[in-house]
Amino acid sequence: MINKISTKLKWDDTRWYPKALFISKTVLYTSLVAFPLFCMMIMEYMNFGGYLHIALEWRSNFPLSALFGAIVVSFIFAALLLICRKAVIACAILGLVSTIFGYVNFIKVATNGDNFFPRDIAMARNAGDLMSFVSGDIPGHFWVGVATIVVWVVVLGLFDIEIPITWKIRLPVAALAVTLVLVIFSSNNRAESILSRFNMSFFNAALQSSNYEANGFVSAFTINLLSMNIERPDGYSHDTITGLLEGFEYTSATQDYFDVIVVLSESFFDVRILPGVYFSENPLPNFDEIIARPNAFSGLVYTTALNGGTIRPEFDILTGLTTDFLPSGSIPYEFLRGPMATHVSNYRDAGYRTIALHPFTERFYMRHIAYPFLGFDAFYGYEQLNERFDLQYAWGGKISDISFFETMKYFLDDALIDAIPMFMFAITMQNHQPFPPMPYEDIRIHVTSDMLTEGVLDTVTSFTHGLSDADTMLGMLVDYIDNRDRPTVMLFFGDHLPNLGGQLAAFTQTGMLTPGEFHTPEARMLMYSTPFIIYSNRELAPILPNLDNHISTYYLLPILAYQTGFYRTAYMNLLLDYFRRVPFHNARLNLPETDDNQSLANIMRLITYDRLVGGGYSVTGD
């Protein structure tokens, strides 16, 4: 073949050309061994924030995890070569996937603190919506890596590098190898045994931040891929579940039904706690005044989301369950197959009209499918609200909280006319990331700090204005509640800390958090806590307080039910019992384990499994 090419090109010196071609092809064939390792290094480089020295340190500190990742990527590449035959195709596929995965992982960490999980692929249909939230600079060396892959692939194509094996051998070998791997890893026990040889475990998936830091992107992603199903908890059975609820009875309502308003305020967070950051005026005057009232119960709620991931605390609060034990990165609503018992369905079954409002697309996070299963009679997303109301946009392009309040008021007024009690769940959108710099003439609250870089200070300033508008809406809502004759109670809470600069920039630059110490309980309690308020136009029944009213998400609606005299199921009474013993706990807080903590975690694991995908035995107990 070389002679034919040489003759065809009519080279004068036919002696050196075949040698050069032979050497070039030999180098290119040899380079195929390095190609998957190069792709892996790009993913790891992005996994560690675009810091090459940290990626190299990881490879030295965790050689077995790095070796496992190299084996995984090399196996995938070998399978692609056997299937495609031509190196240009196999390299193009692996290179494209690797750069996309590395890019998405970096962006996701920068925007919401979470890594890229296998289940995120299911969100590809919402890619346009997700990209609207993207902010942060891409490390320059990433583009160098992309350019290197492109050149590498082009050269492989020009020299027509391919596997010189007939398809009758290649395809069966590829099929056999893939089948063998699937069979080996189809058993959790076999998979766990293999992972243990590389000092890894399925348990790593319980805390994803350390999973991706210790195991690297490829190995951590593989662990998550192998643990995507909700595992049946040890000891799960009808007798176990009914035994947990033994001694907890149904409690009848003791008061007239209250209208219930639950407001998830996007990224609501007391920005004033940032050290060394000063504001020309108080951005939260209404919040301060309301929490001091006698008919208010307020504190901090510990969520399972950071900088994003609204769906997690949303699910926890509405269902009384927890996302702690669901596959990492999963959308809890994707596991729903039919109606389930939730706090929403409790109100619906009591004769309430149950509605949800959100000025964003109904399909995001599969809410349009899940909400009827949770017990909502109706869900009004952006598509329907925009047709019926004069929605106004705030700076940054999101529906303003003040405008959204008017839609809430409309439905609440309707409830007064119909004389039917209302349960309303409203998700605001104005203060969703990103937070672009505001024009100077539009700035009402000037933010100053000697500790923040200019870009981060601009981000904090924009966020503060959105926070101020959320506070204004809170004041309007409380005034509206006070002027209602019908008993009305409100739960207002923030879903997670805001994304104030990539890699928690505002928090680290001010010294509120220290890089490298994000996994300490003290840091975690700062990172995963947001304010909440329960407020009513009637006196609230007192409930045993704990230190500064720090509580977990799944306690909020049982507490509200207790304070308003609404009926309580056996499961709600179980939660209230644990609230008095373990006021807050979730897997992300890294709290010291106690007997009560472990008991609560086991109960939450069992009942979440039971109600979400199991037999529903705990509902019978209610």
Image: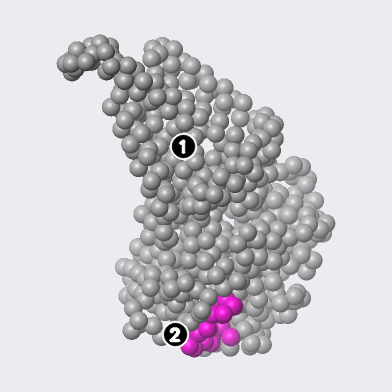
Q: Nearer the viewer, mark 2 or mark 1?
A: 1
Q: Position of residue 131 (x, y in %)?
A: 39, 56
Residue 524 showing in the rendered view: yes
Q: Which residues are magenta?
A: 271-288
User: Reading the chain from its start, which is encountered first: label 2 or label 1?
Assistant: 1
Query: Which residue position holds label 2?
Result: 445
Residue drawn at point x = 38 percent, y = 25 percent: 28
Q: Position of residue 21 (x, y in %)?
A: 31, 20
Q: Neighbour class for label 2 at 10 Å: few (<14), some, many (≥20)?
A: some
Per the rendering, the mark at residue 420 is none
Residue drawn at point x = 52 percent, y = 24 percent: 178
Foreground of the two, 549 or 564: 549
Vertical relation: 156 (above or below) 596: above
- Disc 1 marks which amino acid? Phe
Residue 562 placement: quadrant: bottom right
Residue 84 showing in the rendered view: no
Give the Cα distance between marks 2 and 1. 48 Å
Residue 298 placement: quadrant: bottom right
Residue 60: in magenta span: no
Q: Is residue 200 left or right of residue 271?
A: right
Foreground of the two, 160 or 210: 160
Vertical relation: 367 (above or below) 530: above
Q: Position of residue 125 (x, y in %)?
A: 39, 48
Query: Which residue position holds label 1?
Result: 38
Q: Position of residue 191 (x, y in %)?
A: 65, 32
- Disc 2 marks which amino acid? Ile
Residue drawn at point x = 69 percent, y = 71 percent: 550
